Amino acid sequence: MSEGGQGQGDTGMAVLHGGGSTHAPLRPLAGRRAWLVTDGKAGHEAQAEGVAVALGVDYEWRRVAARGIAKVLAPWGPAPRDFSTAPPWPAVVIGIGRTAIPALRLVRKRAGAATFAVALQDPRTGAGVADLVWVPEHDRLRGVNVVTTLTPPNRFTPELLARLRAEPDAAIDALPGPRVMLAMGGTSKVWRFTREDGSRLAASIANLGAAGASFMMTPSRRTPAEVADAIAAAIEPYPHVIWRGDGDNPYARFLAKADAIVVTADSVSMTGEACASGRPIYVFRPSGGSDKFDTFHAALQRCGATRPLQPETRLDLGWHARPISAADTIAREIEARWASRARHLGPLMETRP
């Protein structure tokens, strides 16, 4: 689902780059090369990077700048002429985004069995475009090579969150507990943040503040100014930190150091990132929505990962869901299928350095 699924891209978070990870060497793809073929959208890149980090691969970005007829025809049609594909082939190629799918298909065709191809999100061309396709559970695509998870992948592993939690941050660490992160989305294709929605959210947050909470707020590029102003006014009487778009974005540190998280229902990615924390999560629902969003949020409530936020909600730190790590689930499925292919094809799977 693309509507509102911006996550780190929503907040302008600087993506944490790097190759490989600290995963155990027993993971069969750890240290091997990977290409991440994306349309350049920050939310898409966060998902692709999350899977790459979980695999422990040494990855490089292959961004697709589709123009003209290539952009119009995507995900069908040819890859952009300036998209370079040549050996040495990577062990894995991960593609995400409508305009990136033709490039993913081209890599798969030219590399053959040497490269395991993965498509994240519904490619809109059928599941046969890749060796493995991931979609969220609320999407309809299914098949023998389709894997689903409740939330999207992200790179917020328990190890990363623990490291960020331990690192000092004077402004955040000075906030008294409980610290509540406010992850704000905004208007999108199916969601509207009305003035009434802003007032209702402000009342809910002020109620938490009156009960002793402090706040860490990250508005989105999609957050209407009047809503952001209403929330800023609501937390003004209480200890708080607001990121206003200048300098380093503390989104990741907010997520790691929060005792509880309030997230708006319009962003699937930010909700999934909150679920990676294992903290109590309260979801505020603005006006609008869709059946897919309803299915997504209902499933999270059923498994105890989230609760709805209302003006009368009392902050409860006593309930915790287990952290949800979609990236690790997807990575293990890739590893199992890659290992099965390696057993059958042997030397054909070797990639040149």
Image (spheres, rainbow, N blue to C red):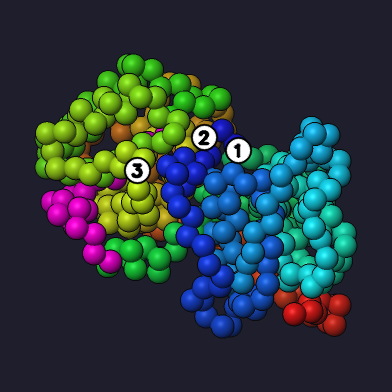
Q: Position of residue 297 (x, y in %)?
A: 46, 38
Going by the image, does 323 lie left or right of 4? left
Quarter of the image with the C terminus is: bottom right
Q: Regarding mark 2 in the picture, which secondary structure is present there?
A: loop
- Report if residue 201 is visible in the image: no
Image point 30% across, 42% down: which residue? Answer: 243
Marking on residue 1: 1
Image point 44% across, 59% down: which residue? Answer: 156
Label 3 sits on residue:
246
The image shows residue 161, relative to residue 348, as above or below, that is above
- Mark 2 against mark 3, which lies toward the viewer? 3
Q: Are marks 1 and 2 in contact (CB under 8 Å)?
A: yes
Q: Is residue 68 magenta?
A: no
Quarter of the image with the N terminus is: top right
Q: Earlier in the sequence, mark 2 or mark 3?
A: 2
Q: Position of residue 294 (x, y in %)?
A: 50, 32
Label 2 sits on residue:
4
Image point 86% across, 66% down: which residue? Answer: 112
Local crowd size for mark 1, using a 10 Å CA cut-off: few (<14), some (14–19), many (≥20)? some
The image shows residue 205, relative to residue 17, as above or below, that is above
- Mark 3 against mark 1, which lies toward the viewer? 3
- Mark 1 against mark 2, which lies toward the viewer? 2
Going by the image, does 197 lie left or right of 79? left
The residue range painted magenta reads: 167-185
